[in-house]
Image: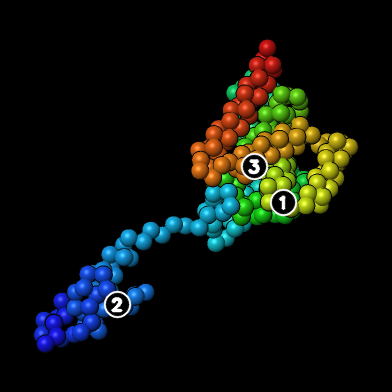
């Protein structure tokens, strides 16, 4: 006499669950690595399996579109450029970075709005092309949140150094943030063991242009490069066992550095 299926009385079966030994008919058994499982054990196994999202080498979530944040940043820059084109000098003067205005009028928003602001078409074209070349690589390596954090803090680092060293000079453009991406690419290449020659050559050309072409705020470029490189180093070399905590601490330290330089600049202007 064969036992009845545990879910279907009167339905005899000679097969048992390999985990709990309950008798199971063909309708109530699930193929397993060894033998069969009953539906109850199969459901418990599925519930116990924790699914975790894949992570990048530096702890960020792997995204299907590895350039989404870069595309959104470019879109914001283009929209602001169109507003500047239609609004003219009045619009630009309202959002451009000028250390004197920040210090005397408390218009701190300028340190962030200026890094999305362009006026000349060649300026925005070159910056957005550079962003499209560098951005997706860094975004895919770091993940969206880490990438956006680095980009914004690098831009703010450029603004801070401009206020400190050239407070009366009006400055606009995404170049400081883009130089932060240069710093990030160099750190990532170094950490991964890639050849640094090509990217260093591109950076050198940009630095030569920075210091030889008139009208370029070299302070923004250097500030962005330093902050972007520091944050990327914190991302890349954080120990795996404490990665998130160390990376967060590096971001906080970079933010405090930028804030400190900005406050020193304001004190210098108003003093």
Dot 2: what SS? strand
Residue 197 falls left or right of residue 43: right
Closer mark to the observer between disc 3 and disc 1: 1
User: In the displayed structure, does residue 52 sit left or right of residue 153?
Assistant: left
Q: Quadrant of the N terminus?
A: bottom left
Question: Which residue is outermost to the right?
Answer: 212
Location of the C terminus (image quadrant): top right
Between 93 and 43, the residue placed more toward the observer is 43
Can I make out residue 259 in this image? Answer: yes
Q: Residue at x 81, y 52 (%)?
A: 198
Local SS, label 3: helix
Q: Which residue is mark 2?
A: 36
Residue 234, by quadrant, is top right
Residue 150 appearing in the image = no
Q: Position of residue 207 (x, y in %)?
A: 83, 40
Q: Find disc 3 in the rendering and name its residue.
A: 232
Residue count near mark 2 (Cα–Cα under 10 Å), binned few <14, some 14–19, many ≥20: many
Q: Secondary structure at mark 1?
A: loop
Q: Nearer the viewer, residue 254 or 86?
A: 254
Q: Which residue is mark 1?
A: 193
């Amino acid at each position: 006499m064969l036992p009845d299926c545990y879910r279907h009385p009167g339905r005899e079966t000679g097969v048992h669950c390999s985990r709990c030994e309950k008798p199971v008919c063909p309708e109530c058994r699930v193929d397993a690595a060894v033998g069969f499982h009953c539906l109850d054990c199969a459901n418990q196994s599925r519930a116990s399996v924790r699914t975790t999202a894949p992570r990048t080498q530096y702890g960020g979530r792997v995204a299907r579109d590895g350039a989404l944040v870069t595309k959104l940043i470019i879109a914001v820059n283009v929209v602001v450029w169109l507003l500047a084109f239609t609004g003219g000098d009045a619009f630009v003067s309202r959002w451009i970075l000028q250390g004197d205005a920040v210090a005397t009028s408390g218009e701190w928003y300028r340190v962030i709005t200026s890094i999305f602001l362009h006026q000349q078409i060649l300026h925005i074209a070159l910056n957005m092309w550079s962003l499209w070349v560098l951005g997706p690589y860094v975004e895919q390596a770091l993940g969206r949140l880490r990438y956006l954090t680095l980009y914004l803090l690098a831009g703010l680092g450029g603004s801070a150094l401009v206020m400190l060293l050239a407070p009366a000079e009006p400055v606009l453009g995404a170049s400081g943030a883009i130089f932060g991406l240069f710093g990030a690419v160099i750190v990532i290449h170094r950490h991964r063991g890639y050849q640094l020659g090509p990217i260093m050559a591109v950076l050198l050309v940009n630095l030569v242009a920075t210091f030889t072409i008139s009208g370029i705020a070299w302070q923004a470029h250097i500030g962005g490069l330093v902050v972007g490189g520091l944050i990327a180093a914190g991302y890349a070399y954080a120990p795996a066992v404490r990665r998130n905590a160390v990376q967060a601490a590096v971001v906080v330290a970079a933010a405090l550095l930028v804030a400190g330089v900005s406050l020193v600049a304001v004190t210098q202007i108003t003093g």
